[in-house]
Image (cartoon, grey):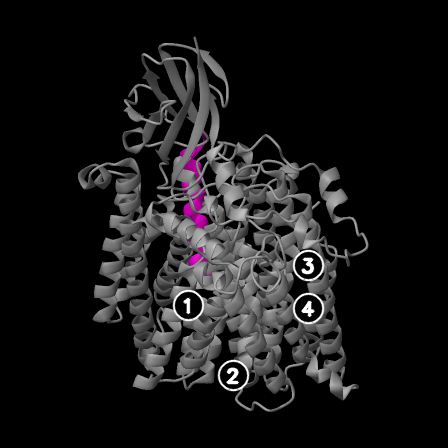
Amino acid sequence: MHEAFFRRADAIKQGFFEGLPIGALRAPRSPAGVAFPRISVSFSILYNSLGISCLFTCVFVVGEEDVMSPGHRLRVLLLFLAAVVSLWITAPVLAHAVLLESSPALKSSVSGPDVPLKLRFNVRIDAARSRLTLVDPDGTQQTLEIHGETGPDTLAAEAKGLHPGTYRLRWQVLASDGHITRGEIPFTVKS
Amino acid sequence: MARLLQIFGFLSVLLRGASLTFQSLTVGGVIFLALVLRNFSDDSEKVKATCASWLRRFALALLAIQISYLITNSLILMESAQISLAEVIGANFVLAGALGIAASLTIIALSARWRASSAGELLLPAAAIIASSVLTSHAVARLEYRLPLVFVTALHHLATAAWLGGLPYLLITIRRTSSTELARKLCARFSQLAVVSVVVLGSAGLILSFCYVGSLKAIYGTSYGAMVATKAMLFGLLLSLGALNFELVRRGEASAILSSLKRFGEAEIGIGITVILVAASLTSLPPAVDLLQDRVPASEVFARMTPRPPRLSSPAIMDLPEDVYAAQKLAFESGSLTTESFVPGQSGTRPNTPAEKAWSEYNHHWAGIIVLAVGLLALLAQAGKVSWARNWPLLFLGLSVFLFLRSDPEVWPLGPNGFWVTFADPEVLLHRIFAGLVIALAVFEWRVQTGRVASPNVRLVFPMLVAVAGALLLTHSHSLGNIKEEVLAELSHIPLAVLAVMAGWSRWLELRLPAENHARAWLARLWPVCVTLIGVFLLNYREM
């Protein structure tokens, strides 16, 4: 029991403090639930709904009063805080900018040592505030210089001097509407 | 920062939802003051001052939300892209945020020293708020038809604000004014504004749907399309309530209609906020036209939704993955989860095993049986023929125990991990707390149903909870791209959510409408029917 406890606690701590993607640690188990395919989602939502319903109810109930007494204000504040805290606990996954095509393609093989990189998205991208990072087979990372002269939806760069092996191209883009999105393209460089 | 990174995805949707809501309330207030309260006699000054005071509060809330959004997005961008604050400042969302903040501050300042002539001065900052919102919408990032889409989106936001954002001010003025004649005039004038707004809203919505969804197949084949259809459904629900209001204003006696009008208005505001939350969720999804691969074909939707006998036998617990955390982490590290787009701090999910799916279906089906029984007993209780049927909330106790046992199969009492793991994992802890809250809710509503609670306001907790749960279920749109299972899950959630919203607000209206309003009779039947249907849908819930 204690072993399981510490393993899980370590995993959670790692997720909290080392910034690992939350989905890597919060598994999508799919047992019970009232209306959802995954219990983690369903319970989080229902729990949050309790918090928010407290907030909404207090707005309506207290709203009937012409003048709020200090007691009423305190109650509203506490319920509001409860709602906010409950909302902080959940984290569903959402994204906006979508990678439409890339070169190299996902899990493809390319010839080295110099590899041109091109990523096309579904929306306008703020290239100056976007990033391309190459992860070498040994895990070292290098930030690539993004070329300026590309279309509004495209990021381009060139990775030079690559040895044979499996690489990962990590991208992060800021869409023109302010959404930040990221992803990863694994590819192999042939000899 | 790590914690902020983890919740960033949800936080941005939440902030977007709050921003759209308070934007509508602020701009709606300006329009209400400028158009509905325009040229009224001196005795309406008190009402105008009250509206200005609420306008200031909503603008203040909008200001706080915009500052929070700006700080959060900037911090995340600086941290994740390793860029300086100076580089962030030129970003589009920063300029939009700054514009919104300046406009909110102007409205706060102008409404603080309210005078009759201020209404016109407020229009410019209100327009700036709409502009700031449009600058962070889908339209501004589109590659084609950018300017027309920006214009149509601005109209969409403006009409939403005029109608839904103006409604609370109408309720405030009705409550504040002592003159029924003035109240009636206000209602009539607001009705005209609402009709125009609805036409603009519907037309703009149609154009945007055509551009962002693109085809009928995308409506059921993608999450974005399904959510747009849901928004249209809720819009229809709002229109029905609006039509009831319209009829009341046109034909009813002023003294008799006002209290009904207020109650319908409350439900309209609630459903309106639900629609705005759905809209906020939509802005975080890629438009359906951009997703051309892996759409769910109609045949798969029919196959999934075709009624089948419920699964009443559970798979053995030994068949479930022993350590879901390790499995998920392994899947992430092996790179099999990295083909999608994510917001910073999040990643994809591991596909469930057949045993996990069967476990989930079993749980949903038993939950469905309980909810179905709740709905049928509530229906009997409402008919007044069977007195013991009023005890239906006690069935939730069974649901609570069931969820407690089955929600986390890897943890005590069913799983190999001990009781203390409950406290190590916030998710498991939440589930346990929630099981306790369901018990509290069951006892609470049972006391209401059996007449042990007299306070009229306290009785509103249950319908509010149901309505908000439905709204949140709609808000949680979690499909990243065209993962078919996610879309199918979305399609199974939508009817449950819409029914929950309907059940909550019909019960709310049943409790709030004056006794002489005839609508109460059918509303009293409507919510148990909705609960019953939720049970039926749960019984046909499938994951494979």
Can see residue B502? yes
Percent coordinates x, y for residue B322 in the rendering: 59, 48
Nearer to us in this view, B252 or B295: B295
Q: Secondary structure at mark 3?
A: helix
Magenta-highlighted residues? B142-163
Q: Mark 4 highlights which residue?
A: B531
Please tell me whether mark 3 or mark 1 is closer to you in this view.
Answer: 3
Q: CA distance from mark 1 to mark 2?
A: 18 Å
Please determine if labels 1 and 2 lie on a single subunit: no
Q: Mark 3 highlights which residue?
A: B364
Nearer to us in this view, B210 or B469: B469
Residue beneath the point at 64% across and 74% down: B396
Using the image, name the chain to which the residue with label 4 belongs. B
Question: Residue B417, located in which quarter of the rendered image?
Answer: bottom right
Q: Secondary structure at mark 1?
A: helix
- Of labels 4 and 2, earlier in sequence is 2
